[in-house]
């Protein structure tokens, strides 16, 4: 099992069980004990878990907690690419779209280059820079910059967005479920997401399965306000979500 996939399995197990043992992880991944210990050490350095005797436990998360972009970029990379490709397939030439900040929305950008006469609005510094590299027509929304996500927020961004008509909006989320909707830690970034959804003909939330039943401080939309593009979810969760919204799944 490759390193990325193995570490994803470890994090998935932690999300489910809160505490995992090295013995269980070696059995599950087929890796040696020394390899698993090295994985746990590296994941602890990224503040994604806490090592304990014989294993690891999930880091208790706050409603206001948000990992840095560089850390999130390392997780679920292959899944994010598949989700990004599925999202880009929904875009037509000559459209105006909004790209939220985040590692999954950024993964869409290389696939956008084949579209004709596309206009992309984004509040993400990273996204804007990459869009420029691919010579895609871009409007960078300016405002106060959030260090953790490198996204512009504030009244200037909101005022501009409220005057725009968007064909489609593509956004990330820090957590989602039927009860709490889509949530994110920062209220100002939440407002940007909310307005982008309101101003678009169709909004999509790009998320992997690990965000399900994760809840953060600020709700920016109800489940029914946006379609979901995700990797494979358990059948019972899929059935519940499909009662409220459109769910598009990608498979490896």
Image (tube, rainbow, N blue to C red):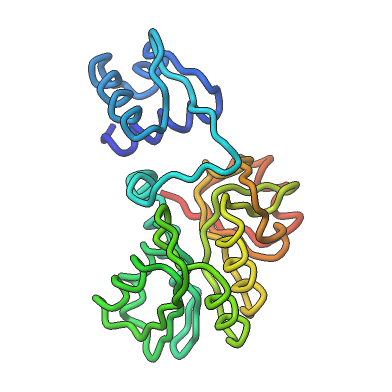
The residue at the point 27 percent across, 82 percent down is 135
Q: Which residue is more in the foreground, 6 or 154?
A: 154
Identity of the residue drawn at 51% across and 67% down: 153
Within the image, what quadrant is residue 214 found in? Answer: top right
Residue at position x 32%, y 75% in the image: 131
* Front in this rendered view, residue 45 or 17: 45
In the rendered structure, the answer to whether residue 218 lies left or right of residue 168 reads right
Of the pair 156 and 210, the residue shown nearer to us: 156
Q: In the displayed structure, does residue 183 sit left or right of residue 85?
A: right
Q: Which residue corresponds to the image point at 34% horizontal and 17% vertical from the top-left?
A: 26
Up-down relation of residue 167 to residue 37 (above or below): below
- Give the image location of residue 144, x and y in percent: 46, 67
Q: Quadrant of residue 6 in the image?
A: top left
Quadrant (top left/top right/bottom left/bottom right) for the N terminus = top left
The image shows residue 77 at horizontal and vertical percentages of: 35, 49
Taking the view exactly as shown, the residue that stands out farthest to the top is 53
The total number of labels drawn is 0
Q: Is residue 98 above or below residue 82?
A: below
Q: Position of residue 8 (x, y in %)?
A: 39, 36
């Amino acid at each position: 099992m490759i390193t990325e996939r193995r570490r994803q399995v470890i994090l998935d197990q932690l999300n489910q069980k809160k505490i995992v043992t090295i013995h269980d992880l070696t059995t599950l991944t087929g890796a040696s004990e020394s390899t698993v210990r090295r994985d746990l050490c590296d994941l602890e350095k990224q503040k994604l878990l806490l090592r304990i005797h014989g294993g690891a436990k999930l880091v208790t998360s706050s409603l206001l907690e948000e990992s840095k972009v560089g850390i999130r970029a390392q997780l679920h990379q292959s899944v994010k690419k598949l989700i990004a490709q599925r999202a880009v397939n929904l875009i037509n030439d000559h459209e105006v779209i909004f790209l939220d900040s985040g590692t999954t929305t950024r993964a869409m950008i290389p696939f956008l280059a084949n579209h004709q006469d596309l206009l992309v609005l984004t509040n993400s510094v990273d996204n804007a820079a990459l869009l420029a590299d691919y010579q895609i027509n871009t409007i960078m929304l300016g405002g106060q910059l959030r260090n953790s996500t490198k996204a512009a927020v504030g009244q200037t961004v909101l005022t501009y967005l409220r005057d725009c008509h968007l064909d489609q909006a593509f956004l990330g989320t820090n957590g989602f479920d039927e009860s709490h909707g889509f949530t994110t830690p920062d209220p100002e970034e939440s407002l940007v997401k909310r307005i982008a959804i309101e101003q678009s003909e169709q909004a999509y939330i790009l998320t992997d399965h690990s965000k399900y039943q994760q809840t953060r401080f600020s709700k920016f939309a109800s489940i029914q306000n946006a379609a979901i593009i995700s990797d494979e979810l358990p059948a019972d969760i899929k059935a519940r979500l499909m009662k409220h919204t459109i769910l598009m799944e990608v498979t490896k």
